Image (spheres, grey):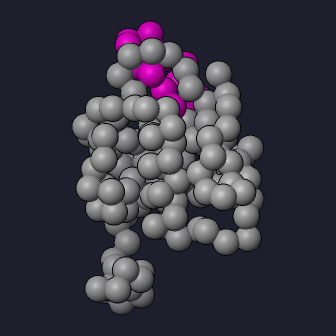
Amino acid sequence: MGYYVQADRGVKLYVEDVGTGVPVVFIHGWPVNHRMFEYQVSQLPKYGYRCIQIDLRGFGRSDRPWTGYSYNRLADDIRSVIDALQLDRVRLAGFSVGGAVAIRYMSRHAGHKVAQRCCCSARQARYSRDGRISRTG
C-alpha cells in the first residue's frame, strides 16, 4: 500500500508499506527511488517481514523542495516516517547514500526505535566537529 507521510512543513514523502511482522525500513541510494528494493519486497513478507520503502525527498513520488537535502534533514525525514507509522524494533537498511543516511540517523537520533542497521555499498561521510562534511581524509 502506498501513501504519503508529512516529513516537514510543505514536504510529503511517499512510502510503500507491504506485509506484516518485523519492520524493515529501506532507504534507497542516489539517483533511484523506493522501487530499487522491489525484489526484496516481493520475497521478505513471505517470511514475516513488513517492508517499508521510502522515496527520499527529491526522488520518486516524494515532494521536491528547493532545500533540505543535508544528511541531517534526510535523517530527520526517516525519523518522521518511523514516528508516523509508530514503528518499533526497526531494521534499517540503506543502500549507497541511503546507508550514509542510516548512519546519520543512528548518530543524530540515538538509534530511536532501531534494533538493527544494515548498510550495503555505503560509506560513512567524515564530519567535522561542527557537523559539516569534511572534504579531507
Give 12 or 127, whichever is nearer the viewer.
12
* Residue at 61% from the left image edge and 30% from the top image edge: 16
Q: Is residue 15 above or below residue 41?
A: below
* Residue at 53% from the left image edge and 70% from the top image edge: 70
Let me know if residue 110 appears in the view.
yes
Q: Is residue 92 left or right of residue 43?
A: left
- Is 60 magenta? The answer is no
Q: Is residue 60 left or right of residue 128?
A: right
**For the stretch drawn in magenta, what is the main secondary structure?**
helix
- Is 39 magenta? The answer is yes
Quadrant of the frame with the C terminus: bottom left
Q: Is residue 77 left or right of residue 49?
A: right
Write down the quadrant of residue 35 in the picture: top right
* Residue at 42% from the left image edge and 87% from the top image edge: 135
Give 97 or 83, whichever is nearer the viewer.
83
Write down the quadrant of residue 118 in the picture: top left
- The percent position of residue 54, horizontal first and vertical second, equals 57, 41
Q: Which residues are magenta?
A: 37-52
Residue, far front: 9
- The percent position of residue 40, horizontal first and vertical second, equals 49, 27
Let me know if residue 121 appears in the view.
no
* Residue at 59% from the left image edge and 68% from the top image edge: 69
Write down the quadrant of residue 88 in the picture: top left
Quadrant of the frame with the N terminus: top right
- The percent position of residue 126, horizontal first and vertical second, equals 33, 77
